[in-house]
Amino acid sequence: MARASVEISRVAGWRWVLWSSLGLVLLRLVYARQVELAPQEAYYWQYARHLDWSYLDHPPMCAWLMALSSFLLGDSEMALRLPAILSSAALSCILYSLGTRLYSPAVGLLTAIAANTTVLFGLGAVVMTPDVPLVLAWASVLRVLCELVLPDGRGPGRFGWRWSLVGLLCGLGLLSKYTAALLPMQVLLTALVTRRGREALCTAHPYVGFALTVLVFSPVFFWNHAHGWASFAFQTMGRAQTMDGFHGYLVGRYVGLQSVAVGPLLYLALLLTAGLLARQAWRGDARTRLLALASVPGVLLFTLVSPFHWVKMNWVAPAYLGLLVAAAGGAWKLRHQHLLRAYAGLSTGMGAVLMVAMYLMPLCSWIPFRERDNLVSGWRELATAVQRHLDSSGKPAPLVVGWGYKTASELAYYLEGRPETQSDSALGGDGLAYSYWLEQVPPARDAIIVADMRQPLRDAGSRLDMHCASVRELPPVTVHRGARVVTTFRLWSCQGWRAKSELARRQAHSTRADER
């Protein structure tokens, strides 16, 4: 009878998760049509337009998914965000399955609910970034590891297919974001500290899985080999060069962003859970070792880095997955304590309020928000103003150059005909992935330069004189969220724009002439 009741509750839980996920998918599809693309989404859409094995600052998975969705459904905001919406629904199901496997169906439900009521995972469900496939792969690896290393797990299966599945998922995670480099190490450590894991390491199955990881990740190796290992250098030495000592304010920014990401009360609960997990894992429990190794190292790593480098809100997302499951397990175990139950409800409710406010902010100008940080409003308004200058410039239309990948990408998406645009690389700066697309821009043409005052072109005079035969400043464009001013853009008309490669050729010619 007890067994039957567990099965019934598990079936009921699955029914609830599936129906609620379907409802959220429909709501998010409607919402995705109403809000302009975030700059990162527009940038990854540019990735998708320039399909490649990989890219300078990220692996290719996000671009491949957007390209597939775009091929099937077009380039609308909803189509480009569809992979994120579907991935979020899949993540809810995996978190439910993970919580049920480790604790109970009730814990699985609490985990899925908690994730969907945070800014990080709830709002992230409609913003397509590399983190979307990353967290899905991360959670999936955790779920499969349950069967491989826990005492009551189902084992590797015939021909060790579950180890191969772990390898495949690790490879997909690495194709999504370089943070997934922690995944194979996490799997190895989990195997080393669990009896069944150590036994598995004496077989060929884990090594076949690792070989599959390398094979799946190989497109990124191919791209880097062809481009001087640029991406690996960017993510290692490039990141290290941006660290210039200890800055206490960065710690405050880190804690503040994480408090917004999951809600301040839940953030405190997750930090407490990390400490409890580490202690319980030290005592030898396989379940807590699995969750601790999946979460505590990541939280610790980014916390230690935070005084030296700006840690963005989404970077810590994978580490929260195991903590959410463990926190839900602890909350359910102590559910009869009124104070703790009230804290759990309040923390989830506060996270939900923050998430809903962030959802509504672009649509409701009365919601208070620091407009400098509002990156999803005003792009259509800017594109309309720039389009007027393009229409009055004759043929061929000038090249549009956005100072900063955000402005360049948004204009590429919202200008009529979605033309090729350029970024800092067109003016001798670091254009990130745009530097690899510069050769696709025809030389010796006019250009319109657009710079966001949130990221001003400080050396505009010297830089524009170097790359333009003549320059004329155009009227600035101020964009709004309702009646609120978001930011102002400066515009210049650049006559006779010269690319960096052409400048290099002219300088080399001038040097040879001087030598003669």
Image (spheres, rainbow, N blue to C red):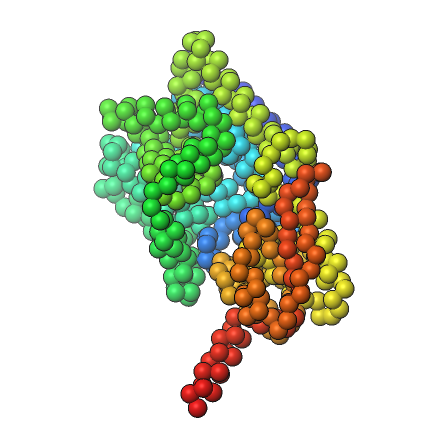
Left-right relation of 387 to 230: right
Q: Quadrant of the C terminus?
A: bottom left
**Residue beneath the point at 49% across and 27% down:** 263
Q: Position of residue 342 (x, y in %)?
A: 48, 13
Q: Position of residue 171 (x, y in %)?
A: 40, 48
Q: Is residue 361 above or below residue 333?
A: below
Left-right relation of 305 to 357: left
Q: Nearer the viewer, residue 289 or 252?
A: 252
**Residue beneath the point at 40% across and 15% down:** 333
Q: Nearer the viewer, residue 286 or 3?
A: 286
Left-right relation of 428 to 145: right
Q: Nearer the viewer, residue 180 or 417?
A: 417
Task: Find residue 248 and report its image quarter.
Answer: top left
Q: Quadrant of the N terminus?
A: top left
Left-right relation of 283 to 429: left
Figure disc tally? 0
Q: Is residue 333 above or below residue 192?
A: above
Q: Is residue 39 above or below residue 220?
A: above
Q: Is residue 28 above or below residue 171?
A: above
Q: Position of residue 269 (x, y in %)?
A: 41, 23
Q: Position of residue 65 (x, y in %)?
A: 55, 49
Residue 393 in view of the camera: yes
Residue 442 in view of the camera: no
**Residue beneath the point at 71% across and 48% down:** 381
Q: Residue furthest front?
A: 461
**Residue beneath the point at 76% across and 64% down:** 392
Q: Residue furthest bottom?
A: 516
